Amino acid sequence: MSSATFTTTMTRAVNLPAGGDVVIRAVGVNYAYGAGETRTQVLFDNHLEISRGEVVIMTGPSGSGKSTLLTLIGALRKMQEGYLEVLHKNLSKAGEGEQVDLRKDVGFIFQQHNLFSSLSALENVRMATALKPASAEEMDRRCVDILTKMGLGDRIHHRPAELSGGQKQRVAIARALVNQPRLVLADEPTASLDAKSSQIVLDLLRGLADGPTKTTILLVTHDQRVIDKADRIVNMIGGRIVTNSLTKVAVRIVRALAATPWLEGLSEATLSRIANAMTVEARVPGETIVRQGDECDRFFVVGSGVADAYKDGQFDEEKCYGESFGMISAYFKMPVPETVTARTEMELYVLTKDDFLHALAEDQSFETRIRSILAGASPVAQPSSPSAP
Amino acid sequence: MSLTSRLGFRNPPLAWRNVAHGGRRSLAAISGAAFSLTMVLLQLGFLQAVRITATNNFDVLDFDVLLTSQRFEQFYGPGFLPLERLRQAEGLDTVVAATPLYATFALWRCPPNPLSDPPSDSAPSPGALTRWLAGADAPRPLQRRQLYVMGFDLDHPPFRSPILESIEVNKARLRVPNRILLNEQSHVDFGWQVRDRYHDWELEHTAVEIVGGFSMLRGFAADSTVLCSDDDFVRICGYESRETTNFGLLKVKPGTVEATVARLRDALPPDVRVDSREAILEEEVDHWVNQTSTGQLFAIGVLVAMCVAAVVVYQVLSNDVREHLPEYATLRAMGYSTLRLAGILVFQSMLYMLISFAVAVAIAAVVYRATEVLAGIPMVLTRQNLALSFGLALAVGAVTGGLTVNRLRAAEPADLF
């Protein structure tokens, strides 16, 4: 992917990092197994930015490349092509020592518990604290605390053979989290847990992300309960990130789109696809965004800030969070119905004509609906805001 | 709080727990390594016995400087030198006394067992194991075997205590021809135990009488020793006269050993060699330990036993790592470096060896005693040998643990996802 395309991808509203402190930055990441005739490429030109404190879910079918990407982010493999920065460390050319150092700041949760059968639950967790040593008492206290949080307070001296499958997995999770890692990489962490244990683990992960450590959590899972806790969902297919949505922003945009009369009635899936195509733009106070009567090729949703709408020179209404304005004049054969001027600094989610036409071409229901609107078959005859006269 | 925390350890005792909870695997490693270390201790014990017996013969003799033939090889092959050389040596003002010692191998008539009903010569002889287990009770026909004979001037016996006392007690009886003293620690076949019930003793082809005994360690070269007067020796062993002897034992004035050796080397003809006590002991040990196959055999035995221990522990440790690859891969994922994991494996390997060493020492103590009783070889577990085998155990542990680290390469943390 070219840098221009990357820029476009990265400015899409739902793709943006949730915060300013980006702890995972992948640019054009490719990866292949084998060499020569047996070379099989599994990652193709992947771009991703994740902020500190985000809970990110990675989904995708088996063989989609999500595990490979996770192992690259976890410094478990050497990078081949592209740029990868994790916890502000460049892994593109990192050596073995740098990889090992980075991994001390990462908590790994695997599908298998991989506990040493000869060690007690406490000692298995202590294997992790030994990497960030304090006094023996302090390390014990940290281990006992997290095991107690995991509901294993009365099992700390039990060996794995004396624990159930779920208890063993909780010990493994405690081992991954005891050092309060800056990044947690987890592979189906709740797969072998019952509902109650899952809830405990998910609350703990969410708490780490929202707490003072603002731990970034990256999970491969298909568990719907986990998806509900996510800030971002990354979907991979065929070695490519096909969806990278910041869920709060996506929901915000979809709600605004759903409230737009000429998009009314479209399915959530279609609205999500349109939302995924929207980019972000900033406006300063006093800046006129669209002018009544002009030809326009963009549709706007207010992300933050306030704008004033004028019709025929008269103040008409305020445009706040989630409200929309603008027009794709070339398609709807209409000029902009109102003038909109930024009152404060604003963040706008923008659907361009090209992306609109692209969505139109991809989505038969959307095209049909628009054509119906244009043909006057819809009760919503005017493709304008609800407040239009 | 866990026990290790109470003891102030920061790292969980993974290596120790793997050994303690290893079940059959740990048992296999420890028993295999303990067996090998027992073999090492035995080989070192034998080697030590070679050292002891190499010097034992000289240890019982009272001298400061030794005159031997220029063809002297070792105590049991001393060569001949003229008695005149001793007289010449006595001419030096630093030489206090010069005493000849005659020594050679001779055939001894070993009594049959049992005395009352000996097996015939044509009867099939029992197997080696049967004889070994039966010890003194093993049936055996009348036979002739070689032993070492030492003859000396009864008025100047060149021996140290306690042999000197044994000679003094029996001196009067030894003056009667064909009377001898037999080593009390002789191999059972030589008949010391039946000396009061058997009377047909023969040395070479001369009928002799045992008038007493003396206590002297047996060696690898001779299973028994006989002491007699120089006159008896010359006659029985076929020496032409007392003018040809085998050893010249010189006592010198205190502090003059080196000077006397130097002066004698200058003064005496080249058919004789002159050595201090210290030098001859050193040479004797060197001969038996380094120049004969005996010492090399035991040294190779030590090497082979250590290799066996290494192979056993390596196999067990490798299997252990292979079966715990996901656990080790998880540790690598967590940030454990290969060096740190190697430390765990080396420590685990060391633990196997240390436990095995303790077991081996206990077994060796029993086997030493049994060997001493059954074979009559002086088996002494010296501090040096204990330290050497301990060092070898640790070295094997370190090397084996180090080699097993290669197995960790298969513990690929990326495969855990």
Image (cartoon, helix red, strand yellow):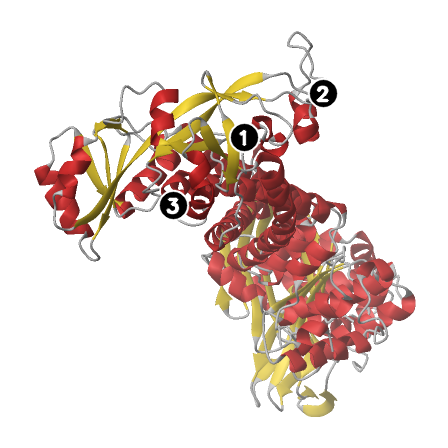
Which residue occupies 62% across, 45% down?
A: B369
Q: Position of residue A362 (x, y in %)?
A: 73, 52
Which structural element holds mark 2?
loop
Q: Is residue B293 above or below residue A87?
A: above
| Residue A267, visible in the rendered structure | no
In the picture, residue B151 is in which quadrant? Answer: top left
Farthest-out residue, top? B122
Disc 1 is attached to a residue of which chain? A
**Would residue B360 be found to the left or right of residue B216 on screen?**
right
Q: Are marks 2 and 3 on the same chain?
A: yes
Q: Amino acid at mark 2?
A: Ser
Q: Amino acid at mark 1?
A: Glu
Disc 2 and disc 3: Cα gap in Å? 39 Å
Disc 1 and disc 3: Cα gap in Å? 79 Å
Which of the numbered marks, if any, corresponds to residue A37?
A: 1
Badge 2 density bin: few <14, some 14–19, many ≥20, Cα 10 Å: few
Q: Amino acid at mark 3?
A: Asp
**Would residue B222 be found to the left or right of residue B252 on screen?**
right
The residue singled out by tag 2 in the image is: B116
Q: Position of residue B299 (x, y in %)?
A: 45, 37
Task: Indicate which disc, 2 or 3, sits on the residue closer to the N terminus.
Answer: 3
Which structural element holds mark 3?
helix
The residue singled out by tag 3 in the image is: B59
* Residue placed most toward the observer, A229 or A258: A229
